[in-house]
Image (cartoon, rainbow, N blue to C red):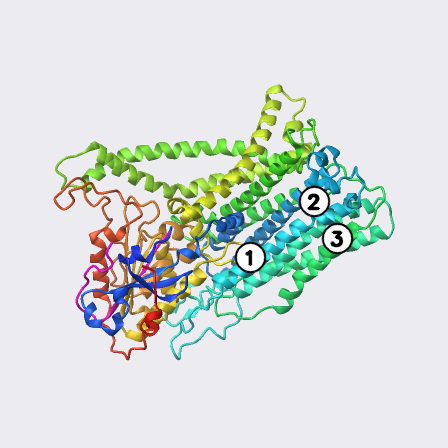
């Protein structure tokens, strides 16, 4: 790859800003030079140049025939040491956040759009409650309530001896055991609050450039505080409707994240307080007195604060029409604090002496809590689906939209399923560990420790879900093989210059194209998994509530085959849910440490963390809230200081960052910028799954506002594809002709060795890349005579950091 390929010798100063994609890249690879210098930025994200180009602005005569290459390296925003694999534990939160941005586009229906945002935020809130409830299940129920009450369990695990009910120590009282165990979920909630606050400061607290409007144009700075994202209000701009990603406050959601962080932190503390107060209050209800009154008062306080949390979550979405620096001080300061105070009162209430109180069975209220959460999540997802259908129905351009606009509800269902698998997996593994060789809930010999019945039912349906997934998986595999055979004739027709046909070579290329097309089948798989999960989840709740027992016991007395099948699915599901959780964390750690593994699954993670935290404040941080302002500032400052031309060149996810940054530019700056995308998922992934932000209208608008745009793609690329923006208003179509991959069929004088099938990588190695970039630079207006501002790279002199 050679970014210094000669370009047209006209037009004056030109800069090529390279933005890498998934998996990251080094500045040495991007600039094709071992000696590179960081000219601005830090170790997390920075701009780099070759050492010989450091003073390019001082010697424009050297660059009459080519642009100055400059690389933006942002890989450390999404990867790093293995400790970042812990972010994968927040995957359900990230997936729920994605559902917020997947709503269908709509104008003139602000009520429905707002309702969509409210429902997604409520789904996200249930995930926080579920995670905290799972921690309470492990610490309070399985350990402090069930294991400590069993002499066999405390004898097997001596470190729990001081909690043993049989030994009669001070901590043996059930309330005190629960109060001590409540420290675990409380610390977990506190850790989530800390991580959310810390990552906001490290990643997202970057102020985007101001000045979208030209001088004298109506400014949005004084506009009313409206939920632009939740109302579908495009807002007026200086040159027609302002796109959603071009709003000044789109990449700065400080106020919403702070508000949601306070609400979710309070919800976590209240979940722990409810678990403590419910257990103690149920015991006190059997002996009327001051304890019963205090219990009811404490539960009433928990309920009142829970209603306040719901009001905060439902009250308002994102404010994007201006940079919102306001902080709701009262809310942020006292809502989590008040909830923590109620939790402290619950600890004191549960911890006082209650002679004769013993623990038996499961912790009171746990089965009802998990069942209610599951039903609430199902109802919210169904309601979200109804709203999405109403938003999508009148639109005629929904043919490419994933699941006909139901992508958001389907993904929200997957978030709930992931949270259920993770919480159930931890509970099942801990129960198996404490229960010894016995099967939880089966009444075998041993301590007889088990999680809530519903979690066992949910684990039991996992084998059924996997069997159901075999059908579409087999169908897709067969279709891919057949497509590969059909494509053989097209492959041979594309390489008409080949003198000899090689069936093996033709088969390899055809198979590569067929496998790349599997990406377009992702909506079908997501729809099948989400639908099956919703139905099986409903069946799990019905089975748990109807039988009141685990599946292995619920079918006692039935036909032996049915009883054996129920027992087998429970055992297999319990093992699979725990093993799957461990495998998930292991893969996540490998993805952060192994570049090849990261390239395989990194696109999904990078898509999830591209979007701001609009639904869940504990989701992994949004790297685009750092990267997009970086790119926007750099393009604005360079064109302003030099008056020259600029082509921003983005590969894969870098093309999405490039497009988002171009949308944020002032109109005068966009007139000096060309956009070159390659291997781009702008339409294939983002346009289909996020139609309100990257749909056909948005991409056509981007083409009209940027000076010129060209997109390169290959048929063998499983990620990138055409952007499908046609020629209009005198502008050519954005998509160039499909690049041949490999560039040569067999051995030729120009290619004496076999050329590899590149797929998604090394677009710059194709000769068409340099030609297309040169054509873009030719179309840009010549450099404007301008008094050059001081070059920051030259100013730093010997302090410039070499990464070579």
Closer to the chain start, of discs 1 and 3, is: 1
Few, some or many residues within 10 Å of mark 3 (<14, 14–19, 20+): many
Few, some or many residues within 10 Å of mark 2 (<14, 14–19, 20+): many
Query: Where residue 56 sits: x, y (%)?
Result: 25, 70
Q: Nearer the viewer, residue 762 or 323?
A: 762
Examine the rendered structure and indicate whether residue 571 appears above or below residue 2.
Answer: above
Examine the rendered structure and indicate whether residue 445 appears above or below residue 44.
Answer: above
Q: Residue at x 39, y 41 (%)?
A: 521
Q: Please state the extent of the stretch shown in magenta in the rendering.
A: 1-22
Q: Is residue 95 visible?
A: no
In what element is the residue under mark 3?
helix
Q: Quadrant of residue 462?
A: top right
Q: Nearer the viewer, residue 677 or 423?
A: 423
**Cα separation between marks 2 and 3:** 12 Å
Few, some or many residues within 10 Å of mark 1 (<14, 14–19, 20+): some
Query: Where residue 444 sits: x, y (%)?
Result: 68, 27
**Cα separation between marks 1 and 3:** 25 Å
Q: Nearer the viewer, residue 530 or 210?
A: 210
Q: Give the residue at mark 1.
A: 195
Closer to the chain start, of discs 2 and 3, is: 2
Q: Give the residue at mark 2.
A: 140
Report the number of numbered marks: 3
In what element is the residue under mark 2?
helix
Q: Are marks 2 and 3 in contact (CB under 8 Å)?
A: no
Residue 10 lies in the magenta stretch:
yes
Q: Give the residue at mark 3.
A: 347
Q: Is residue 500 visible?
A: yes
Q: Single out the residue that lies furthest toward the front.
A: 798
In what element is the residue under mark 1?
helix
Closer to the chain start, of discs 1 and 2, is: 2
Q: Quadrant of residue 348?
A: bottom right
Q: Residue at x 17, y 67 (%)?
A: 9
């Amino acid at each position: 790859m050679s970014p210094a390929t000669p370009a047209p010798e006209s037009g004056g100063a030109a800069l090529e800003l390279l933005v890498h994609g998934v998996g990251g890249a080094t500045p040495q690879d991007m600039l094709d030079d071992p000696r590179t210098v960081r000219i601005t930025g830090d170790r997390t994200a920075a701009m780099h140049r070759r050492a010989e180009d450091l003073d390019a602005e001082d010697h424009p005569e050297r660059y009459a025939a080519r642009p100055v290459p400059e690389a933006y390296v942002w890989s450390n925003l999404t990867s790093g040491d293995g400790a970042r694999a812990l972010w994968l534990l927040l995957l359900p939160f990230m997936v729920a956040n994605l559902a917020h941005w997947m709503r269908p586009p709509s104008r003139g229906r602000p009520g429905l759009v707002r309702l969509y945002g409210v429902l997604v935020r409520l789904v996200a809130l249930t995930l926080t409650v579920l995670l905290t409830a799972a921690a309470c299940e492990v610490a309070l129920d399985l350990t402090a309530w069930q294991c400590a009450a069993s002499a066999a369990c405390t004898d097997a695990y001596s470190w729990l001896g001081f909690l043993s009910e049989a030994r009669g120590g001070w901590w043996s009282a059930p309330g005190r055991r629960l109060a001590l165990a409540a420290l675990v979920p409380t610390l977990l909630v506190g850790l989530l609050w800390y991580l959310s606050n810390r990552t906001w400061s490290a990643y997202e607290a970057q102020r985007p450039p101001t000045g979208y409007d030209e001088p004298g144009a109506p400014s949005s700075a004084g506009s009313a505080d409206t939920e632009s994202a939740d109302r579908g209000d495009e807002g007026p701009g200086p040159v027609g409707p302002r796109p959603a990603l071009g709003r000044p406050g789109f990449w700065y959601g400080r106020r919403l994240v702070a508000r949601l962080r306070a609400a979710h932190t309070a919800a976590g503390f209240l979940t722990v307080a409810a678990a403590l107060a419910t257990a103690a209050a149920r015991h006190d209800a059997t002996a009327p007195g001051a304890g019963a009154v205090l219990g009811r008062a404490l539960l009433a306080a928990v309920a009142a604060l829970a209603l306040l949390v719901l009001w905060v979550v439902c009250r308002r979405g994102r404010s994007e029409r201006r940079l919102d620096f306001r902080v709701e001080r009262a809310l942020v300061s006292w809502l989590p604090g008040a909830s923590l105070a109620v939790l402290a009162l619950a600890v004191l209430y549960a911890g006082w002496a209650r002679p004769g109180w013993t623990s038996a069975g499961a912790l009171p209220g746990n089965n009802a809590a998990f069942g209610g959460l599951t039903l609430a999540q199902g109802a919210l997802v169904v309601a979200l689906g109804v709203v999405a259908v109403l938003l999508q129905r009148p639109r005629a351009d929904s043919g490419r939209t994933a699941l006909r606009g139901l992508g958001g509800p389907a993904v929200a269902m997957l978030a709930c399923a992931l949270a259920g698998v993770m919480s159930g997996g931890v509970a099942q593994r801990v129960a198996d560990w404490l229960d010894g060789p016995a099967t939880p809930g089966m009444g075998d010999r041993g301590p007889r420790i088990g999680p809530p019945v519903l979690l066992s039912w949910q684990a039991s349906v996992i084998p059924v879900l996997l069997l159901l997934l075999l059908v579409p998986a087999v169908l897709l595999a067969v279709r891919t093989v057949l497509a590969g055979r059909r494509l053989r004739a097209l492959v041979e027709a594309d390489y008409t210059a080949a003198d000899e046909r090689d069936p093996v070579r033709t088969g390899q290329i055809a198979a590569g194209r067929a496998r790349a097309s599997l990406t377009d089948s992702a909506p079908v798989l997501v729809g099948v998994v989400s639908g099956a999960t919703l139905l099986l989840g409903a069946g799990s709740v019905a089975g748990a509530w109807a039988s009141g027992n685990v599946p292995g016991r619920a079918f006692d007395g039935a036909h032996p085959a049915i009883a054996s099948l129920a027992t087998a699915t429970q055992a297999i599901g319990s093992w699979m849910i725990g093993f799957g959780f461990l495998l998930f964390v292991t893969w996540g750690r490998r993805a952060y440490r192994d570049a090849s593994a990261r390239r395989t699954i990194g696109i999904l993670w990078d898509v999830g963390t591209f979007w701001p935290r609009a639904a869940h404040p504990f989701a992994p941080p949004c790297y685009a809230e750092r990267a997009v302002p970086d790119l926007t500032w750099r393009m604005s400052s360079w064109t302003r200081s030099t008056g020259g031309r600029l082509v921003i060149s983005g590969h894969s996810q870098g093309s999405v960052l490039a497009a988002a940054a171009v949308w944020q530019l002032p109109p005068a700056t966009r007139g000096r910028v060309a956009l070159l995308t390659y291997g781009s998922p702008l339409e294939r992934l983002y346009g289909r799954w996020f139609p309100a932000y990257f749909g056909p209208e948005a991409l056509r608008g981007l083409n009209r506002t940027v000076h010129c745009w060209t997109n390169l793609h290959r048929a063998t690329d499983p990620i990138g594809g055409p952007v499908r923006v046609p020629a209009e208003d005198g502008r050519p179509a954005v998509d160039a002709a499909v690049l041949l991959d490999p560039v040569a069929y067999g051995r030729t004088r120009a290619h004496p060795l076999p050329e590899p099938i590149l797929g998604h990588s090394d677009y710059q190695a194709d000769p068409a890349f340099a030609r297309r970039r040169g054509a873009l630079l030719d179309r840009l207006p010549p450099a404007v005579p301008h008094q050059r501002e001081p070059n920051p790279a030259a100013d730093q002199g010997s302090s410039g950091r070499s990464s070579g």
